[in-house]
Amino acid sequence: MKVIITVVEKIISEAHIDIPDGLNQSAIKEHIVDRYNTGEMQTEMNIFQVDFQSISARIVQEQSDAKSA
């Protein structure tokens, strides 16, 4: 019997980055989003918290390789 298990977790990551002085709120948001979208910030992300959401299992019926005659 084959069973497919699906685990759903919510992962909260935290990054500490330097942002240029003098930016308004909109520019700060754009700077952060740009760094994330280019992948620059992903290497700085540390897993801060993982919350378990759900787990489920699905039984998969295996098909026989034998052919009917």
Image (spheres, grey):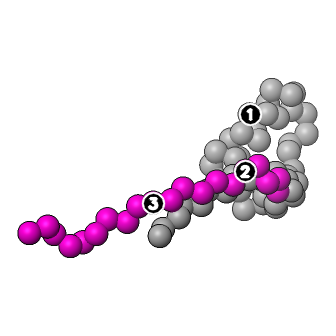
Query: Quick check: marks 3 and 1 in contact, CB under 8 Å?
Result: no
For the residue carrying disc 2, how many other residues have a C-alpha within 10 Å: few (<14), some (14-19), or many (20+)?
few
Residue furthest right in the image: 21
- Residue for badge 2: 54
Rendered residue at 87%/27% (across/down): 24
- Residue for badge 3: 60
* Residue 48 is at least partly visible in this image: yes
Query: Quick check: marks 3 and 2 in contact, CB under 8 Å?
Result: no
Callout 2 amino acid: Ser
Residue in the foreground of this view, choosing between 48 and 17: 48
Residue furthest front in the image: 69
Rendered residue at 82%/35% (across/down): 28
Percent position of residue 47, x then y: 82, 60
Which element is circle 1 on?
helix
Residue in the foreground of this view, choosing between 64 and 10: 64
* Magenta highlight range: 50-69
Rendered residue at 69%/47% (across/down): 36
- Residue for badge 1: 30
Rendered residue at 86%/56% (across/down): 49
Q: For marks 3 and 2, give the one nearer the viewer.
A: 3
Q: CA distance from mark 3 to mark 1?
A: 46 Å
Callout 3 amino acid: Val
Residue in the foreground of this view, choosing between 65 and 45: 65
